[in-house]
Amino acid sequence: MSPVFPMLTVLTMFYYICLRRRARTATRGEMMNSHRTIESNSRTSPLNAEVVQYAKEVVDFSSHYGSENSMSYTMWNLAGVPNVFPSSGDFTQTAVFRTYGTWWDQCPSASLPFKRTPPNFQSQDYVELTFEQQVYPTAVYVLETYHPGAVIRILACSANPYSPNPPAEVRWEILWSERPTKVNASQARQFKPCIKQINFPTNLIRLEVNSSLLDYYTELDAVVLHGVKDKPVLSLKTSLIDMNDIEDDAYEEKNGCGMDNLNKKFSSAVLREGPNNGYFDKLPYELIQLILNHLTLPDLCRLAQTCKLLSQHCCDPLQYIHLNLQPYWAKLNDTSLEFLQARCTLVQWLNLSWTGNRGFISVTGFSRFLKVCGSELVRLELSCSHFLNETCLEVISEMCPNLQALNLSSCDKLPPQAFNHISKLCSLKRLVLYRTKVEQTALLSILNFCSELQHLSLGSCVMIEDYDVIASMIGAKCKKLRTLDLWRCKNITENGIAELASGCPLLEELDLGWCPTLQSSTGCFTRLARQLPNLQKLFLTANRSVCDTDIEELACNCTRLQQLDILGTRMVSPASLRKLLESCKDLSLLDVSFCSQIDNRAVLELNASFPKVFIKKSFTQ
């Protein structure tokens, strides 16, 4: 055969791929990037004037630094016009997430990551904002006032939160997405990413952030949505197309969650069954399973369509021991769970965080799934899963007898009475109730029956009346406790601290940040230092009374200390900090922001003497 024909075949295939990509770009509205070779421009008529609007409301978020009863450092500060911008620095009028850097991942309370998490899903927190008018977005501006660079994804929703009639279908579309990148400057900026054009109007925007590369807390001041009322006409300008663009397209499809396959049942009847499976017949079953274990969930669903042998492997429940569905929150629904149900009878770790909101998952669908797949569950992540109600927690308590870890972080719509069911989970070792409405009676019952607890988070639980009573019960019942988060608990006193220190000698991590009723003069911090020698992390954030005596006690007794936050104290001198740094050789994080005796010169001197320690000192312009 002449060598011309193979060459023609290759050229034909290349031309076909180029046409497919052009057609796909036309339908999706490709976002403008410097490395892209297809550009999209919108033409608007003079009558289709651009609408510029600030956020009207903050309707949902995963965490914030502030409290539930004030506006300082809360996500609610994102609503309305800027409070601070263009000033730079640490301001209470901005929106701040709870964590930054990798410090929280290095703590004893950190959970192990899920396997099979797609590498392109790196979101850690989110906030959703509504706007007055629905528009076709032309730009989204984020006003960042301190340590910018956390925003990695911006999405738009087709649902109108102010419409009295819920839509039949809710769609989320990615306007812009990028991997976490380091921004060297900490100054304020107006972040203006080039967004993709979408084919529906929106007044609901979602920002997703990753703060792992930040040196300190990021602060956001406002979000501005630009758009037009009428659908713009898309014009395409095409130039030469290279193969890198085609590969990027495949990446973007995965980045768009790639979960459409979960909503379709794949029938093995349509799969070809040949006389043999080639070299796969020579491989042990276990080896094929091990190879497939490296695939993401959408890839497993795609591979299941190739042949009966691989379909059998892809549907094997052993492939779903660890199941992370959080990356697919935008498309996961009851149909998805029903499709996965037969495959997940052996699931032990299940992550449904951020999923099911706005009617995507029903109580019936969730309950049906757990009744089939809950018997082997050991770990269940349900952070920000707002479809949950009392029935769901009752089903969890009945269907998951082996559960050891339960995360209900920011499930702030759960009614207080629902938490009573958690006390039936007597094997619990980890319980996260951050930003929930758990009440004192239910929590006391949980502590009484769940004596195996090792990790407990009660941060920002505003419905608890007396934290001293809770601390007393923890000290009496939870002897194995290793980490305790009491961030912003409003009324714990030295009496509660005494019960904790004497009853929980294994504590390695204790967060008492923003607990205003603790006073150093009572000796409570000295008691902690002397009775908890295993402490690795201690946050005493915004406690104005922490003094040199407390720091010196920590230096003498808590030599394993790795992280210490004493932001805001007026009573600590550079001399006591030097003693601490000399004694605690493992100390890696020290926050002395707004400590009036620790000026920038003192920080520079300590940094020079202890270069391995990250000493944080924020500022206000």
Image (tube, rainbow, N blue to C red):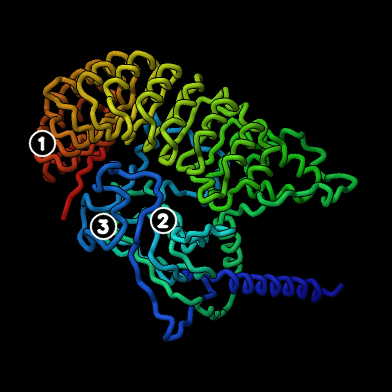
- Residue type highlighted by circle 2: Leu
Q: Which mark is residue 541?
A: none
**Quadrant the N terminus occupies:** bottom right
Q: Residue at the right extreme?
A: 275
Dot 3, how many residues are within 10 Å of its Cα: few (below 14), some (14-19), or many (20+)? many
Residue 219 seen in the figure: no
Taking the spot 76% from the left edge, 44% from the top edge, the residue there is 311
Q: Locate residue 152: give its quadrant.
A: bottom left
Disc 3 versus disc 1: distance between alpha carbons? Answer: 26 Å
Q: Nearer the viewer, residue 544 or 313?
A: 544
Name the residue carrying label 2. 207
- Residue type highlighted by circle 3: Thr
Disc 1 versus disc 2: distance between alpha carbons? Answer: 36 Å
- Residue type highlighted by circle 1: Arg
Q: Residue at the front extreme?
A: 164
Query: Is residue 72 shown above or below 468?
Result: below
Please, what secondary structure does the residue beneath circle 1 have? loop
Please, what secondary structure does the residue beneath circle 3 have? strand
Name the residue carrying label 1. 570
Residue 23 seen in the figure: yes
Name the residue carrying label 3. 145
N-terminal-most mark, 3 or 2: 3
Taking the spot 22% from the left edge, 16% from the top edge, the residue there is 530
Please, what secondary structure does the residue beneath circle 2 have? strand
Q: Is residue 240 left or right of residue 495?
A: right
Residue 23: horizontal and vertical position, in percent? 64, 73
N-terminal-most mark, 1 or 2: 2
Marks 3 & 2, CB-CB < 8 Å contact:
no
Q: Is residue 302 left or right of residue 155?
A: right
Q: Nearer the viewer, residue 93 or 394?
A: 394
Query: Is residue 459 shown above or below 79?
Result: above
